[in-house]
Image: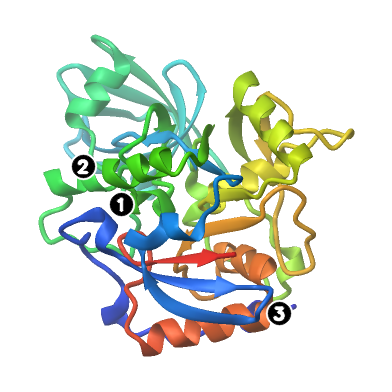
Amino acid sequence: MKITDFDFKLPKELIAQVPLPVRDRSRMLVVNRTENRFFDDHFLNFVDHLSTDDVVVFNNTKVFPARLFGKKISGAEIEIFLVREIEPLVWEALARPLKRLSEGSEIVFDENLRAKILKITEDGRCQLAFLCDGEFFEVIERIGRTPLPPYIRRDNDNTVEDKNRYQTVYAKSRGAIAAPTAGLHFTSEILEKLRERKVTTVEITLHVGYGTFESVRVQDAADHRVSSEQFEISDEAASILNSSRERGSRIVAIGTTTTRALESSLSNDGKIRAGKNAAELTIIPGYKFNVVGAMLTNFHLPQSSLLMLASAFAGHELMMRAYSHAVAERYRFYSYGDCMLIV
């Protein structure tokens, strides 16, 4: 399929710039694959679409403030976006403006944190080594800023509200540079409803990386590759999931990151593997899903890998009709927007 097959017209005013006052008041488009139809609902009714046999799987990754602002010794201002930890205190990063940096350049972020550029890579990134007076992540939490997606605009950069709201209420494991946005709709009240309904819940961890922001730069969708991301499934979580699959229970993935991790987790014997592994799948229409039976997701960018994944799950024709409906009905799009439940 061509990447243009995943295009649609999206008015700019539908791109949600701020979160709703209350997380769980978002709208929810329910897409039924079996019946080839969809209908409007609200996320408050999410639990009503589940049964006690279902297993809901969350990605408990925690976003850290990965945007840093510093200066070279010359006084030139530099923005660093941490992408991936290579080893303790050595990171791969994006730098802006990169042309002001060279190997050996030093950047001062504050009195407790400095860095030296080790290497400029061919893909426009850099590697830098930090010198930190104190615990690294404590300093980062103090001086760093929330890594909001580029389509969310702020006149005065991010706010305290973004630091709280661009994070799921169940976030635990620090390491993501982007939120698993389908989880942003959940509140403690909705989680309590799941417990009251006696729906089994499981947490896994996939640290969302820069790949979630990367554009698809090929014409043929089959030529695109989503960057590898590390995920971890505990022994207990794997046991619950494998037992549930043997019983024929439906696995409900909260978000595309959870979906990609689960689909990447199968061993050769068809069992979900515990431990740390790499999610390397690029899921496009034609892919056969082996684990996930339902998925909650937000509305994604035109011509994006995430829209391709959702189309693979729901079917391309049904998904594009659903997106046209969402635009016509003025759903809110992207990270702070509304959601879609595909069953």
Residue 217 visible in the picture: no
Q: Amino acid at mark 2?
A: Asn
First in sequence, mark 2 or 1: give its number. Answer: 1
Which quadrant holds residue 285? bottom right
Please give left or right for residue 245 compared with residue 41 in the image: right
Which quadrant holds residue 243? top right
Secondary structure under the numbered disc 2 in the rendered image = helix
Secondary structure under the numbered disc 3 in the rendered image = loop
Please give left or right for residue 43 compared with residue 239 in the image: left
Q: Amino acid at mark 3?
A: Lys
First in sequence, mark 3 or 1: give its number. Answer: 3
Please give left or right for residue 160 compared with residue 323 in the image: left
In the image, what residue occupies the spot 20% across and 35% down? 74
The one of 45 and 180 positioned closer to us in this rendering: 45
Work out whether 143 lies above or below 331. Answer: above
Q: Which residue is mark 2?
A: 164
In the image, what residue occupies the spot 61% across and 45% down? 53
Q: Which residue is mark 3?
A: 2
Q: Residues within 10 Å of mark 3 (few under 14, many from 20)?
A: few
Work out whether 203 lies above or below 29. Answer: above
